[in-house]
Image: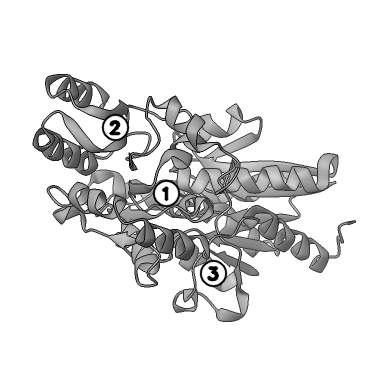
Amino acid sequence: MYRIILSGGGTGGHIYPAVAVAEALRRRLGDEVEILFVGAEGKMEMEKVPALGYRIVGLPVAGLQRRLDWRNLLVPFKALRSLRLARRTIREFGADAVAGFGGYASGPVLRAAQRMGIPTLIQEQNSYAGLTNKLLARRARTICVAYEGMERFFPQEKIVMTGNPLRGRFSREGTDRREALAHFGFEPGVPTVLLVGGSLGTRTLNEVMKEWIPRQGGTAPVQVIWQTGKYYEAEMRAFLEAHPTARIWQGAFIDRMDYAYAAADLVVSRSGACTVSELCLAAKPTLFVPSPNVAEDHQTKNARALSDRGAALLVPDAEAVGRVMDEAVALAGEPERLAELSRRIGELAISDSAERIVGEILRLLGEKGRPVRE
């Protein structure tokens, strides 16, 4: 029996890559592997991971607030308690290897494992490395990345290009476009733009639509799949009712993202790491509007890693309202340019990321003297 700890959390961008690797480990090893997740108490992983059938231990670790806040005084004490609990968890579980997927939740358990001589692997989703991963890199055995040029942050000899592991299927084939268009009440022959703001929603992208819709005279020049997010659903639904416009589908969530990607000629989106990886796999021409409200402005760096190679377009958040949809409509009418963007972004896709990371974990087990049967 091989015992593997996977750690990371705080956001879906850290949790779901870890879950994708857990699923790949089970496919590869079946009943020969036992998996334990370690997260942060009170964070979303404590609910999401058990719902997917995995056991999780929560640590009292907390991150520093970016503003003056009395809770920052408690951070060192929580870190020490988390280290002690992490050591106990590793020892009681009998971990053979520990893999971290970013976020401060992974810090204590990987640090404890490194001090105990247990091999560790870290996976960095973004083109600009997070603080936790940078601190852990020196004693990690392997560092899995999704972007080139990561030797700026990590020892080059430890870096392995794996891409970002994703759950579900994202591909440029397999979903019928006519069926997808019909799902949204659309018709073939009219270009379709997918504007997606994530599960909670994105104020900027919703404001983009609020500015653009009144200028359309009741009928949009393109079909638009407008995902508002749950925070903004009521407000945006009321707005659309007050400004009825044909060819617009609007909803808080998109339950069939495979249909949304199949229907879309062009995507307007934020540029979180997993979103970028999905769009590469789907080979979708994309106009990125990076969120400025993230650590180290990493979404801009993610988007620029593609735009600098001609694989996507980038509009700064501050310029989005009044610009994005006009550019999207113009681009949707240029099939040759869309085809070139699709080709270039598709060239960056890595479809077997989870399996590559599993391979690296198994290599660490072999180095520890626990070779895995093929």
Is residue 316 left or right of 41 when viewed as pictured? left
Is residue 3 left or right of 136 when viewed as pictured? right
Name the residue type under label 1: Phe
Residues at marks 3 and 1 touching, judged by CB atoms closer than 8 Å: no
Label 2, residues with CA under 10 Å away: few <14, some 14-19, many ≥20: many
CA gap, disc 3 and disc 1:
23 Å
For the question of whether residue 133 can be seen, the reply is yes
Q: Earlier in the sequence, mark 1 or mark 2?
A: 1
Q: Which mark is residue 77?
A: 1
Name the residue type under label 2: Thr
Q: Which mark is residue 228?
A: 2
For the question of whether residue 104 can be seen, the reply is no
Name the residue type under label 3: Ala
Which dot, 1 or 2, sits closer to the camera?
2
Q: Which of 322 and 105 is in front in this view?
A: 322
- Reading the image, the residue beneath label 3 is 137
Residue 99, x across and y down, in percent: 63, 55
Residue ID at (69%, 42%): 23
Q: Which of marks 3 and 1 is nearer the N terminus?
A: 1
As helix, strand or loop, the secondary structure at mark 3 comes to helix
Snapshot quadrant of residue 338: bottom left
Residue ID at (80%, 68%): 367
Q: Nearer the viewer, residue 144 or 120?
A: 144
The quarter in which the C terminus is drawn is bottom right
CA gap, disc 2 and disc 3:
38 Å
